[in-house]
Amino acid sequence: KNAQMWNECYTEHAREKTCTSPQFQIHHEQQIGLCWKQSLKCMHCDYHSSMFKLYTEVNTGHSGQRAATTNVGLHVGLQDSTIGTTKIRHILAAMDTPPPSRAGLQRTANRVATVTAQATMDDLHRRREKTKETNALRGLPKDAPINISVDVRYNSTNLKNSYSCGGQNASQALGTAISWQTGEKEIIGFCLDNKLCKLGSSLRNKGINVTCPGHAGCTANVQATEPLSEYRIGKKIGDSLAQDNIAIKYVATDGDALASRGIQDAMPAGMETQRQADTTHLSQTQFRHIMKASFSPRMFPGETAARRAENRRMFAEDVKTRCQKIYTSVHMLHDSDATVIARRMPDIIQATLDCYSGSCIKCRRHAIVCRGGRKNWWNTSQHLKACGLTRVNMTDSDRVTLQGLLEMRLGNAALQMTHRRLTTNPNESANRA
């Protein structure tokens, strides 16, 4: 664009002026976001050009000044990053590049966000239609039920360093629904509950009585005093899926089952939606229960209380890892046949208890992940080797307690809640991104 401007100015100058030695310099310039308009003038005569746009424009099909592709592209990128207009102005200023005005950046961001929102809804509709086509290719009815995972993320930091939700200090909650019908794990539904409205705050500061949501141009869809609800988010996601005739059979959630209940209430009458427990969160719950369990004082050896506590923590990590390995291995071994797995699991649990007690007699036949002999679990476990733990002194009471903890992950109730092997890991990745 710059070369085109200079060439056209030379041609125009030669055609209109008698000046034989033109010397051009910038006559006027105007910043348009990250782009510029410029005009040239001749130092030896009175020639000056019209303004040239040194950028390409987005063809919107509407009248008025069109946006520059570079400015639009900037905001497309900012939507996928954690910085906003203020930080991008700081970055440009640090690069000695004149930053665009904050108001101009915000106007372009609003226009790009509107287009992105519509493109997102169109893309979700396309993905849902693809789901129906996949059902047809498998010989199923197009409206056959599918399995999804749902997770909600809040815009608040959990200061207690636990796995519970952020709490009601959050002002936004984002829920995503991911399809497990194929290996692509595509998002087919989402919902954003938002209490924030900058326009409403500005009007109230000016003394104008407005209520969010409800006034013109309001961006909030939840009242500030109303608690954020995973049930409401699940209900909204379920309503949007039901509008496209997408039926849900199983919903994987973390420990909070309200989202699955909301999806169930949104499904047509007669369609039963069942909750599946997220295997990752279930393992974390098992770990926390082991750390809180009432074992005998001498179960975990160690010279000091700190050493015994560390051995207990490594033992809890080992039990969690071993149960997950057993769960994965037995599903692969029996091709996820729930009946066979449920029949074998009591023997597996008893063999695991004997193994932790120091006897590997049943391991080769039942323990799945321990073969006995030199390759027994005690010699191959990374957690047990890391702390040098070679035994645990289990009493009969400890054995009963540990059996209950193993059944949290491998018992009949747990197997029924996890037999679809669904997790919310893809949801958490998408939400954090």
Image (cartoon, rainbow, N blue to C red):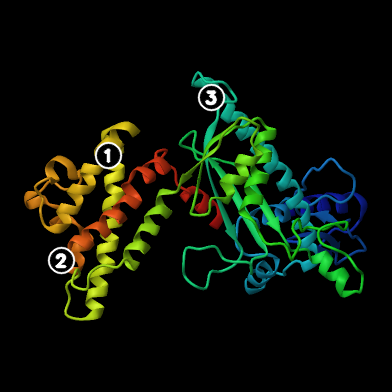
Q: Residue furthest bottom?
A: 304
- Cα–Cα gap, marks 3 and 1: 28 Å
Residue 119 location, x and y as percent?
70, 42
Residue 391 location, x and y as percent?
14, 64
Numbered tag placed on residue 330 in the rendering = 1
Q: Which structural element holds mark 1?
A: helix
Residue at left offset 72%, top offset 47%: 117
Identified by mark 2, the residue type is Asn
Judged by depth in the image, the label closer to the viewer, 3 or 2, is 2
Q: Is residue 282 left or right of residue 348?
A: right
Q: Earlier in the sequence, mark 3 or mark 1?
A: 3
Q: Which structural element holds mark 2?
A: loop
Q: Which structural element holds mark 3?
A: helix
Q: Earlier in the sequence, mark 2 or mark 1?
A: 1
Residue at left offset 81%, top offset 53%: 10
Residue 170 location, x and y as percent?
64, 66
Q: Are marks 2 and 1 in contact (CB under 8 Å)?
A: no
- Cα–Cα gap, marks 3 and 2: 54 Å
Residue 362 location, x and y as percent?
12, 45
Residue at left offset 83%, top offset 61%: 40
| Quadrant of residue 31 within the rendered picture | bottom right
Local crowd size for mark 2, using a 10 Å CA cut-off: few (<14), some (14–19), many (≥20): some
Local crowd size for mark 3, using a 10 Å CA cut-off: few (<14), some (14–19), many (≥20): some
